[in-house]
């Protein structure tokens, strides 16, 4: 009876959500109206588990006094529950208690602890348990080998990972793809790409289908060493084996360009691929985007032209990046032309493209067009920019011609973590021109200057924009 109680107790220990009393602290938080955060719950749960584990060991002590000990299955269940909750140290304490009771751990208990230790980066301790299993001649499954190999590679101990690989094969197992991927990555990190390539060929012979995780380390290693012939030869093999080389290349260039110092190498590789007819719109887009982000605007736009010259049809992503580039250059008409091409495709520009073009239009005084773009974006995009949402709020509040209510909206925007920018200031001009007056708009800008949100130079710029916008509205009315 007490043994059954102990198992049930240990289950409640590491799953406090099953005990309604354990919820009281969180319930109290809810009742007083405080805002809960994930860290609140995590901290509460950690303290709860820690306290209940101590109680569990008290129960274990009483059981021993009554000459009643948990068996191997009860101990294994406790270890499994503790490790699954991230309490590996508590699991090791239970392990030590099991040894004290002279209960021999089974292969399941060993496996749970080894995997838990490796997950926490404590691979050496996990490897000690693995060696215990070998001494006891326990049957070690392939998953234990895999987690140890992956963990050794993660801590850059590739020699130990390779030793485990050899032991795995000697034990009669066939390595799965995840094991191949881990060892190949480790070898490439150690600059042993030729051995990694041999391992890739072995994987293919064993009829495993290599994925991006298999090939990417080898591809990167070849490129970094400028072994472009070997790189191209590998791509030819990928095509020969019937794999989707375009998918691999897109992922490869995205990975390679994640580090700015490799962008030049990526461009050189792409130049080689183009001569072999292995260019693609997706790779062009990746390179256009990274060039834009590092300020190489003209190079990014040259790739758009080159794409067309090589017979590729730019897609909505291509034109969205081009919009950002043209705005950066101050060529707003070209940016608008790219926007129109995306719409003609029955597609939607990216959110950064919408935001960039709206700001560009505002900076050139095209306020009506900018506000139309704001509405278009919020109509087409599920989660548009915060600036756009508040721009519409500002326009709506301007109906009341109440300066302080406009300021309240801007204060709310700041509390949400966004700072007013040209889109918001243009919305003030648009709204006050439509519903209020020039004087009301000037009062808003004056208040913002007093609050240090705008400089004297900013005030001059927005006053001029306000007058030009009102003059345009007046001339439009006269024309009508």
Image: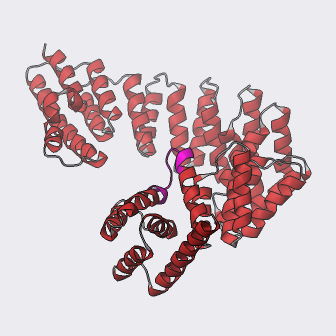
Q: Residue at x 73, y 56 (%)?
A: 338
Locate the C terminus by quadrant.
bottom right
Query: Is residue 96 in view from this perspective?
Result: yes
Q: Residue at x 40, y 42 (%)?
A: 125
Question: x, y percentage for residue 443?
Answer: 37, 77
> Looking at the image, which residue is at 57% across and 60% down?
355
Task: Find out whether residue 97 is within the magenta segment.
Answer: no
State the image coordinates of residue 132 (x, y, percent, origin top left): 42, 32
Query: Is residue 260 shown left or right of residue 90?
Result: right
Residue 387: in magenta span: yes
Front-most of 169 and 368?
368
Start and end of the magenta stretch?
378-389
Which residue in the rendered view is the most extreme toward the bottom? 456
Q: Is residue 441 left or right of residue 60?
A: right
Q: Tell me: residue 77, above or below residue 387.
A: above
- Residue 101 visible at all: no
Direction right: furthest residue: 275
- Relative to 85, is 126 on the left or the right? right
- Give the camera-side residue of 231 and 98: 231
**Quadrant of the rendered image containing residue 122:** top left
Q: Residue 329 placed where, x, y %?
A: 70, 72
In front here: 282 or 411?
Answer: 411
Which residue is pictured at 62% across the width and 47% down the height? 186
Q: Residue furthest top?
A: 1
**What colouring method underlies this structural image?**
secondary structure
Pick whichever, 378 or 23, lies toward us. 378
- Residue 290 vertical position relative to residue 50 in the rendered view, above or below: below
Counting the numbered discs, the total is 0
Residue 74 placement (x, y as % from top left): 26, 20
């Amino acid at each position: 009876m007490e043994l059954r109680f102990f198992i049930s107790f240990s289950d409640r220990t590491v799953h406090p959500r099953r005990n309604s009393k354990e919820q009281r602290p969180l319930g109290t938080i809810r009742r007083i109206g405080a805002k809960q955060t994930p860290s609140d719950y995590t901290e509460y749960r950690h303290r709860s588990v820690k306290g209940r584990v101590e109680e569990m060991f008290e129960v274990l002590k009483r059981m021993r006094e009554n000459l009643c000990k948990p068996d191997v299955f009860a101990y294994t269940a406790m270890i499994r529950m503790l490790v699954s909750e991230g309490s590996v140290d508590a699991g090791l304490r239970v392990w030590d208690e099991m040894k004290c009771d002279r209960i021999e751990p089974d292969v399941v208990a060993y496996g749970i602890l080894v995997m838990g230790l490796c997950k926490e980066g404590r691979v050496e301790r996990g490897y000690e348990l693995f060696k215990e299993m070998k001494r006891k001649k326990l049957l070690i499954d392939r998953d234990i080998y895999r987690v140890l190999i992956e963990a050794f590679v993660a801590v850059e101990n590739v020699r130990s990972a390779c030793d485990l690989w050899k032991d795995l094969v000697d034990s009669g197992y066939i390595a799965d793809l995840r094991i191949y991927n881990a060892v190949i990555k480790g070898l490439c990190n150690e600059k042993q790409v030729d051995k990694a390539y041999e391992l890739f060929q072995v994987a293919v012979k064993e009829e495993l289908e290599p994925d991006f995780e298999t090939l990417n380390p080898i591809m990167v290693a070849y490129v970094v060493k400028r072994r472009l012939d070997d790189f191209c030869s590998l791509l030819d093999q990928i095509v020969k084996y019937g794999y989707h080389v375009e998918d691999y290349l897109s992922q490869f260039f995205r990975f390679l360009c994640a580090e700015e110092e490799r962008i030049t190498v990526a461009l050189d590789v792409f130049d080689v691929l183009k001569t072999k007819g292995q260019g693609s719109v997706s790779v062009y887009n990746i390179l256009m985007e990274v060039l834009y982000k590092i300020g190489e605007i003209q190079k990014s736009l040259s790739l758009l032209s080159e794409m067309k010259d090589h017979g590729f049809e730019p897609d909505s992503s291509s034109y969205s990046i081009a919009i950002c580039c043209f705005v950066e250059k101050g060529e707003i008409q070209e940016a608008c032309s790219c926007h129109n091409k995306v719409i003609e495709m029955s597609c939607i520009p990216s959110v950064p493209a919408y935001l960039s073009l709206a700001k560009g239009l505002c900076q050139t005084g095209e306020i009506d067009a900018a506000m139309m773009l704001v509405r278009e974006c919020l109509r087409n995009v599920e989660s548009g920019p915060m600036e756009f949402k508040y721009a519409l709020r500002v326009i709506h509040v301007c109906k009341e011609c109440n300066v302080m209510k406009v300021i309240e909206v801007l204060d709310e925007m700041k509390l949400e973590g966004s700072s007013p920018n040209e889109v918001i200031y243009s919305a003030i001009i648009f709204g006050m021109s439509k519903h209020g007056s020039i004087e009301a708009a000037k009062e808003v800008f004056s208040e913002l200057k007093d609050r240090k949100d705008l400089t004297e130079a900013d005030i001059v710029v927005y006053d001029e924009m306000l007058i030009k916008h009102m003059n345009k509205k007046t001339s439009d009315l006269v024309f009508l």
